[in-house]
Image (cartoon, rainbow, N blue to C red):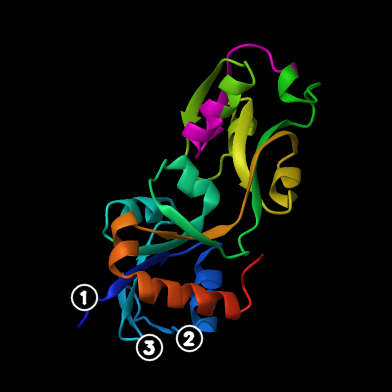
Amino acid sequence: MKMKRKIRIAISSKGRLNQPSIQALQNAGINILREERTYISETSDPRFEAIFARAFDVPIYVQYGAADLGITGHDIILERQAEVHELLDLGFGKCQLVVAVPENLKIRSVKDLPAVMRVATEYPNLSQKYFENAGKQVEILVVRGTAELAPTLGLAQIIVDVTETGETLRRNKLKVIGTVLDSTCRLACNKIAYRVFENEINELIDKLRRGGTVTK
């Protein structure tokens, strides 16, 4: 029986997950044959095609079937509240989603925060849940990137942002006072697509594991 169409894999179009995602697929024997400024690309495996999208949009593409598979951060899947299968921890893109405040504030932990402070973040859902669980009432402002600027400019006293090494936070004179979650990059799958393409997807998972990018 012939497959009706190609299996679509959505990956980040730019940023820190772009090159490692392309490399992981290469290690699994799938080379992306991308031309400049194209968002849909053929691959060296005729069963698959690649779609390039914002990392934050990849889980939505997968949930609603615009893509069958997606490579994106666990933090992003949770933030977008996407109903997808996380089939594999790919092991790269390690980071933490943290709560940070200016170094000069006499605040050591989230428990020390006064009531109703403003929080700048690209992760409003995870942030709201975290502060509710901590018993802290906050006002959340959604910003797209450069959250580290918010305290300097007086936009917000707190940020919730992703950090890999902490270097950007230190450069902006910010200190971590709490960790929301640890994250790595995952292979996400549309729930219906997994049933339709189960053999092909399981074969890809095996190849990704053998490619050496995956943590146990």
* Residue beneath the point at 61% across and 33% down: 159
Residue 74: give its label: none
For label 3, the residue is 44
Span shown in magenta: 112-129
Contact between marks 2 and 3 (CB within 8 A): the answer is yes
Taking the spot 39% from the left edge, 56% from the top edge, the residue there is: 58
| Amino acid on which the number 2 mark rests in the picture | Gly
Q: Residue furthest top?
A: 115
Query: 83 or 1: which is nearer to us?
Result: 1
Mark in front: 1 vs 3: 1
What is the spatial separation of the Cα atoms under label 2 and label 3, in whole angstroms?
8 Å
Horizontal arrangement in the rendering, residue 129 relative to residue 56 (left or right): right
Which is nearer the eye, 66 or 208?
208
Q: Amino acid at mark 1?
A: Arg
Q: Element under label 3?
A: loop
* Mark 1 and mark 3 residues within 8 Å of each other at the beta carbon: no
Q: Nearer the viewer, residue 129 or 102?
A: 129
Q: Whole-percent x and y of residue 6?
A: 26, 76
Give the CA separation, mark 1 to mark 3: 15 Å
Q: Quadrant of the N terminus?
A: bottom left
Crowd class of label 2 (few under 14; some 14 to 19; many from 20; radius 10 Å) = some
The amino acid marked with disc number 3 is Ser
Q: In the image, is residue 117 above or below residue 169?
A: above
Which residue corresponds to mark 2?
29
Residue situated in front as seen by the camera: 50 or 189:
189
Residue at the disc numbered 1: 5
Q: Is residue 138 visible?
A: yes
